[in-house]
Image (cartoon, rainbow, N blue to C red):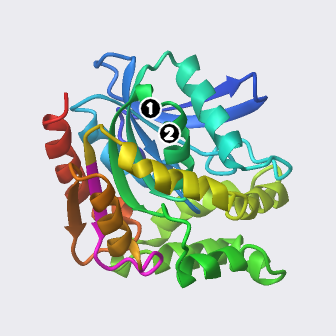
Amino acid sequence: MDHLDSTIQSHTIQLSDQNFNLHYLETGYDHPQEEVILLVHGWPTSSYLYRHMMAPLAKHRRVIAIDLPGFGKSDKNPSDSFSFGYHANIIQQFIEKLNINKVHLVVHDLGGPIALWWAQQHREQIASYVILDTIIYPDFSWAVKLFVLMTVFPLIRTWFSSPSGIAFAMKLGIFNKSKLNKSTLTGYQAPFVNTANDRNARKSLLRSAHRLHIKGFKDIAAGMKDIKQPTCLIYAENDIILPEVSETMKRVADAIPHAKTHCIPSCGHFLQEEKPEAVVKIMSDFYSKTT
């Protein structure tokens, strides 16, 4: 497993209202604590996905990367609902407990709809948006539908949530396969193997993939036009996990005319893993112009 930059600290906070333990990584302590860049991952990753980006982004603001419920080192309870409202309550309680009042939101993959739905309920807290390869609109592509089916069907879902299934998902999302070595891959598999309760961890991973109701996606899509904050759109040219991502970003740009769109060439879905320097450069330029 890759080591974290020495400036990055690992924390777990108990959210008493939800009876939930949420893990997060943090750096940039010399900046005002009430304003953060909040990094939200997707499936099947965790805050680990952002490890190469956090220290460079900390030149701008305090940086926090969370582990969503069912991922990383956060609690994994398969009986939880994993709905839009469930995630929003956890994110909001986390924000309030850390006394954060201004969020520069960064989202990717399944973390996109989760965090964007939360943001729609708390627009006054959002200072800016960076949207990476993600799902926004309710007219899902064949690839998204296939992904959901793979988390539901017996046998297939058992394999998909296993170390080999996670390895498959990660490799599928990397254009240059040499960027994903065995040590790096172990960091993505670790939360679901050799834990106190592997079965619950893997069941939570699967449940998280198909518990977001279609109405939530419709709400997100309808609300995109109401985003007034500075917005940056970044997507990978060779994303075969979300092959429709270029069209998604075009639709977002049409809804948010002031958004700036950037395509990273020769790069797959997990652009934070494959080309973190390129993503950071675009984000740094964006944040330099964002007050």
Residue 86 or residue 248, whichever sits in front: 248
Tell me the kind of residue under disc 1: Arg
Left or right, 7 with reference to 46: left
Residue 120 is marked as: 2
Q: Quadrant of residue 91?
A: top right
Mark 2 Cα shell of 10 Å, populated few (<14), some (14-19), many (≥20): some
Of 216 and 21, which appears nearest the observer?
A: 216
Q: What count of labels does the image hold?
A: 2
Residue found at x 25% / y 40%: 230
Going 62% across and 25% down the picture, which residue do you hit? 93
Part of the protein shown in magenta: 232-243
- Front in this rendered view, residue 251 or 270: 251
Residue 155 position, x and y percent, is: 82, 83
Name the quarter where the C terminus is drawn. Answer: top left
What mark, if any, has residue 123 been given in the picture? 1
Q: Residue at x 22, y 60 (%)?
A: 261
Residues under labels 2 and 1: Cα distance? 5 Å
The answer to whether residue 237 is magenta is yes
Magenta stretch contains residue 166 = no
Label pair 2/1, CB-CB below 8 angstroms? yes
Q: What residue is at 25 percent from the left and 56 percent from the top?
A: 279
- Crowd around label 1: few <14 · some 14–19 · many ≥20 (10 Å): some
The secondary structure type at the circle numbered 2 is helix
Q: Amino acid at mark 2?
A: Gln
